[in-house]
Amino acid sequence: MGRRNLLLCFDAFGTLFKPRQPIAEQYAAVARECGLNGFTTEQLQAAFKTAFSGESKAHPNYGRATGMGAEKWWTNVIHKTFQHLIGASRKLPEALAPRLLHRFSSREGYSLAPQVDSLLRSLKHRRQQQQRSSIAVGVITNSDDRVPSILSSLGLRVSPLRFGSSIKPVDPSSHDEYDIDLLCLSYDVGFAKPDRRIFDAAEDMANQLLPAAAAQEEGKPVRVSNSGPATEDAASLLKLYVGDEFEKDVVGARDAGWNAVFVGTDADIGGQDIDMLDLDRLDTSGLEEVFPDKDTSPVTIRADSTQAFLKWLIERSAAGG
């Protein structure tokens, strides 16, 4: 793969982690623990959808657009959901919103996709052994600022580098300490997938992070500019985005010039007409064969799981791809 650095980014919800049980069932269970009942899970789900939609219109981007903030925004959604179910005259338990907020900011509400933590560490280790190119692993997600705490709670080592953070220049000595090197949340960027600007934001962050990390490993001086650290011989970038929603993740990534990995089935595509390579048929293919280092159109791969794609990528790295 020569001097091509790798920028590997993931969607969060549904790709890196999933709810332990359906969200409406978890809401209902917490409500019952707080003494609320008299409604079905289906009624709760419908009430939640209405509350979520109304709050999104009144206070876009999880409240960031109007200065409310995500915690207050979600508290409003929770209160409006249950107030609709029990009636405006009844008072909601004080513990209800805090307990739900805590649950869905941690491993209490979510579980990590199988082996993601160990596979990411193995991938980084393999590419470091090659000493030919660097890797940055990121998260690009349409979400609020709870994502870092969820990932950390699930056992991943998460860098503090978020879009808009004041960490400049990036400290290259800390690069290898993390499983997740950078986070691009729609909450911070102000644009959500499939808008290409959130993908561009992640690429800009990687263009600061990767040259500095590579320069330190090779003992070369790092030049720091307003756009971040750089070296005189910066490598080209192979951009891969992994997600489970076809329109937001695959179409959005491709339109932004990224190669895409769709985690799902053919039935999840929804009739979209797009050429895809099936991961199961790429067992003997190297990265250069699948992702040519030329001005070609983005490639899309379909994989059964995040775990399956990471195993394939590790095997290609072990083979020198």
Image: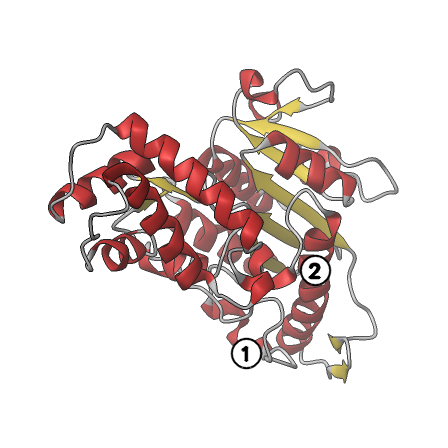
Q: Quadrant of residue 43?
A: top left
Is any part of residue 127 visible from this angle?
Answer: no
Q: Is residue 51 left or right of residue 64?
A: left
- Identity of the amino acid at label 1? Ser
Check the image and report above or below for 93 versus 212.
above
Q: Nearer the viewer, mark 2 or mark 1?
A: 2
Check the image and report above or below for 276 versus 34.
above
Q: Give the Cα separation between the discs numbered 2 and 1.
A: 22 Å
Q: Is residue 90 left or right of residue 184?
A: left
Q: Earlier in the sequence, mark 2 or mark 1?
A: 1
Image quadrant where one finds the C terminus: top right
- For disc 2, the marked residue is 201
74 or 84: which is nearer to us? 84
- For disc 1, the marked residue is 173
Q: Position of residue 37 (x, y in %)?
A: 15, 37
Q: Position of residue 315 (x, y in %)?
A: 53, 39
Q: Quadrant of residue 275?
A: top right
208 or 161: which is nearer to us? 161
